[in-house]
Amino acid sequence: MALISLTERSIFFRIYTGLLLVCVCVGFFAYFLVDTLNQERVQSYREKIATGVFYVVGQEIAKQKTPEARQLRLSDASNLFGHSFSVVPIASVDLKTREWRLLEEEKTVVRYLATSNEYVIFHRISGEDNLLTVKMSQIGERHLRALTIFVLDDLAYYPSIREQQARLEFLSQKFSYKIALTNFGNIELDQDQIARLRRGEPVLMFDNDNGLQNSKISIVAASNVEDVAMVIGPIELFNWAPFNLMVSVALTCMLLIGLGVYGLIFPLERRLRLLQIGVNRVSSGKLDTKVQVIGQDDIARLSMTFNAMTAHIKRLIEAQRELTRAVSHELRTPVARIRFAVDMLADTDDGESRQLQKNYIDEDIESLNELIDEILTYAKLEEGSPKLDWEMVDLRELIEQIERETNALGKPIKILTDLPSLKVAAMADRRYLHRVVQNLVGNAIRYADASVKVSAGILKDTAYVCVEDDGQGIAEADREKVFVPFARLDDSRTRASGGYGLGLSIVSRIAFWFNAELSVDESPTLGGARFMMRWPIKQVGVVIVADELTQQKAEKTLM
């Protein structure tokens, strides 16, 4: 499963693995292609080499008029070649269409028997419905010597040199290589080879000056004319890896690898092109653009990041516009009151009245400071990723601190707490977590009738803080609206009771950066609204001081 996940998620691993598989598949394909082509080539080579030899032998058999003479020539051929020659009716052999065509063209059929590593050779005797056949394992020097004997025997039927030369020119077409008569002096022979020729022995001559790729062999035998030799060849030996074949296979492999690489890269290129189109649309101002997310690899994560980025940019711009409109509206009231108070200070000489107006101005300035602080906090949380100082926060200690600070305000609302057990801690930024609970409690106090309940704890791997009140609650249709900046559900409420409308928006943004779930519903105990934030007690990818966790485990063990 881990390997599958890595394959799905790592684009480079997929490319490298795919390229390796392409190369392996192309390698096997090249091997089987070369093997198949060579099997066809070697089959054609065998038939081409055998055709001339068996044509001469078949002609010799056909010239025998009596069965006894024919059997005698078959015995001679068997003795010379070292394999048993026979004549069988053509109807007794199961021939394929290709083999029939070869026999009709006076060519030789060579069958390879893989089980015994032998060859069965068939050649049709001219003017008869009979086949000359023999089974042999390989061709050696003995067969070449026998070939020269049969060619010389065939030339015996032509008494003049001119007739013999004409006959050899005809046989050259059957043999697919040259056979000619020439003087000893025209052949590069040493004294030993000339002596062997004079004794009636054939001489084999190898030519590999061009390397093993183009090796050739020639057979030289003395004719029935003095100082005249018959030269058969040069005969090209079979080359398993000719240059043109290797070049063709290499080009084919390169083409297949290119197609394979294109098949690997094209889907990625198409997805990148879609991403580029999305970037172009966003750059032209279309912030509602979404790119399709396919798979789970790097490009998919890039697409998801792009979608999140565009959504965040759109939200920032909308929030900026809303903030600009809201701030201008929120600032108008305290500024108007300050202006009114300043005018009153200028128009009165009464000390008590002047002091009262001064107090009003101080209250409005303090209100402006609170509003500016809320705006700056919200903007910091909305515009980008804030710097969070993660640590293990003691939830009990935090709730007790909130209780003390709230009671110190002297509000006529009773604060109830449901404290967790000792040393119950969760990973969080203490300053921002304090702000969450503080804002929730402050919001609850504004709308509570008599009491507010604060609780916190851990359920499995999730920490939570909860604030409830006994007020009128929030209608289900309006519960999402309470987190919108500067939103009021009841326009008749005054600023004294309604605040600035940023407290819950700040809570919402902190919850976002905590990877938390923020919910609002009805309190089951007090009957009013209940706000709850849940977040993981251990943040993914966050490392804190190991001593804190170790200390907590030790204390838990002691308890």
Image (cartoon, grey):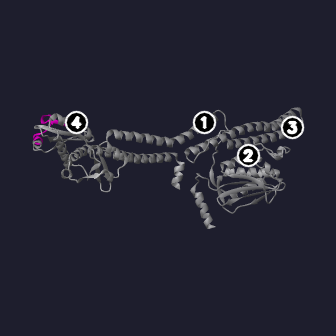
The residue at which mark 4 appears reads as 169
Mark 4 closeness class: few <14, some 14–19, many ≥20 residues within 10 Å? some
Q: Which residue is mark 1?
A: 277
Mark 1 or mark 2, which is nearer to you? 1
Residue 390, image x and y in percent?
A: 62, 51
Q: From where the camera sits, is residue 530 visible?
A: no
**Label drawn at residue 354:** 3
The type of residue carrying mark 1 is Ile
Depicted 401 relative to depicted 386: above or below: below
Closer mark to the observer between disc 1 and disc 4: 4
Q: Give the alpha-carbon distance from disc 1 to disc 2, as whole Å.
A: 34 Å
Pick the residue in front: 245 or 80. Answer: 80
Query: What secondary structure is found at the residue carrying circle 1?
Result: helix
Residue located 61% across and 61% down the image: 552
* Element type where label 4 sits in the image: helix
Residue topped by disc 2: 505
* Relative height, residue 432 to residue 165 (above, below): below
Residues at circles 2 and 3 in contact by the CB criterion of under 8 Å: no
Q: Amino acid at mark 2?
A: Ser
From which residue to which does the magenta span run?
Answer: 178-194
Image position of 463 (left or right of 170): right
Amino acid type, callout 3: Arg
Say which of 491 and 213 sits in front.
213
Find the distance from the CA under tag 1 to the CA under tag 4.
Answer: 74 Å
**Dot 1 or dot 4, earlier in sequence:** 4
